[in-house]
Amino acid sequence: MIQNKIDTYKHKGLRKKLIETIKNKGIKDEAVLQAIDKIPRHFFLDLAFDKIAYEDRAFPIGEGQTISQPYTVAYQTELLNIQPREKVLEIGTGSVYQATVLAEMGAQVFTIERQKKLYEKNMISYPFLAKYKNIKFFYGDGYKGLPTYAPFDKIIITAAAPMVPIDLIAQLKPLGVMVLPLGNEEHQTMTRLTKQVDGTLIEEKFENFVFVPMLKGKSDH
Ligand code: SAH
């Protein structure tokens, strides 16, 4: 999947349509919509997906994993209320699309992937990521987070979490926010946790989604 792709007027036009679609589904945050408008999603996909890259769908990216649906990416990002220069930890790098949306919005992104092949692919496959110096890649277990780089303003989990990962709560700043799909394998409820100054959590529940599972430990392939 070494990419030497071009962002044509056709791709740009399809992206405008995608923006309309996700606006109609309820996404309002202009900064989120602008980031999605700027990022060539087809760069993150195999050539075979070129014509359909701007449909509001998830697609396979290899290793049994997926690039999230644009609406889902926008939904989680809107709930995070990203401000420039915030430190954001992402669990589940996958295709790097979500991380790029956060980086385009000016966040300092720290993203962890548990599958070695995906992690390695991310490091070499995307020449255009060179412009996003604000994304740092890690190979590891997202349940453990990145204690050396903590605390974070925001944490986003992009895989289905069966429970709130306790280690990650500890890595959140006071008044920090975590957005995660929480639930069983069949469906998850998008959940936003806000850490209070006294360490307690305020929990808000949103729509249901279906993500690939958040698995324990690293995988060496
Ligand atoms: N954010 C991605 C979505 C990828 S799908 C994108 O924009 O494309 C979820 C990803 O989470 C998969 O790549 C999966 O391997 C990864 N994952 C699952 N459990 C994990 C864990 N414990 N730690 C880190 N990554 C994990």
Image (tube, grey):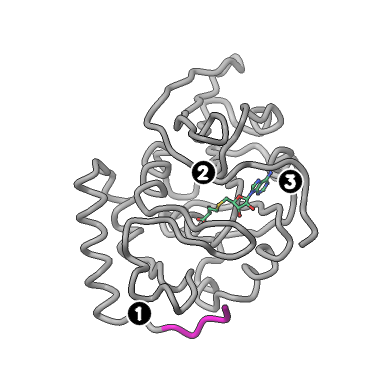
Please identify the residue farthest to the front as the structure is shown: 186
| SS assignment at label 2 | loop
Q: Amino acid at mark 2?
A: Phe
Q: Amino acid at mark 3?
A: Asp
Q: Main secondary structure of the magenta part?
A: loop
The residue at which mark 3 appears reads as 141
| Label 3 packing within 10 angstroms: few (<14), some (14-19), many (20+) | many
Q: Residue at x 56, y 46 (%)?
A: 212
Of the pair 215 and 35, the residue shown nearer to us: 215
Q: Residue at x 62, y 27 (%)?
A: 164
| SS assignment at label 1 | loop
From mark 2 to mark 1, how far is it between C-alphas?
28 Å
| Label 1 packing within 10 angstroms: few (<14), some (14-19), many (20+) | few
From mark 2 to mark 3, how far is it between C-alphas?
17 Å
User: What label does residue 211 carry, if any?
Assistant: 2
From mark 1 to mark 3, how far is it between C-alphas?
34 Å
Drawn side of residue 75 relative to residue 107, left or right: left
* Label 2–label 3 contact, CB within 8 A: no
Pointer 2 residue Cβ closer than 8 Å to ligand 1: yes
Drawn side of residue 139 relative to residue 125, left or right: right
Q: Amino acid at mark 1?
A: Asp
Earlier-in-chain disc, 2 versus 3? 3
Residue 70 in magenta?
no
Earlier-in-chain disc, 1 versus 3? 1
Visible in this render: residue 149?
yes
How many badges with numbers are in the image?
3
Indicate the quadrant containing the N terminus: top left, top right, bottom left or bottom right: bottom right
Indicate the quadrant containing the C terminus: top left, top right, bottom left or bottom right: bottom right
**Chain part drawn in magenta:** 1-5
The residue at which mark 1 appears reads as 7
Q: Residue at x 22, y 53 (%)?
A: 21
* Label 1–label 3 contact, CB within 8 A: no
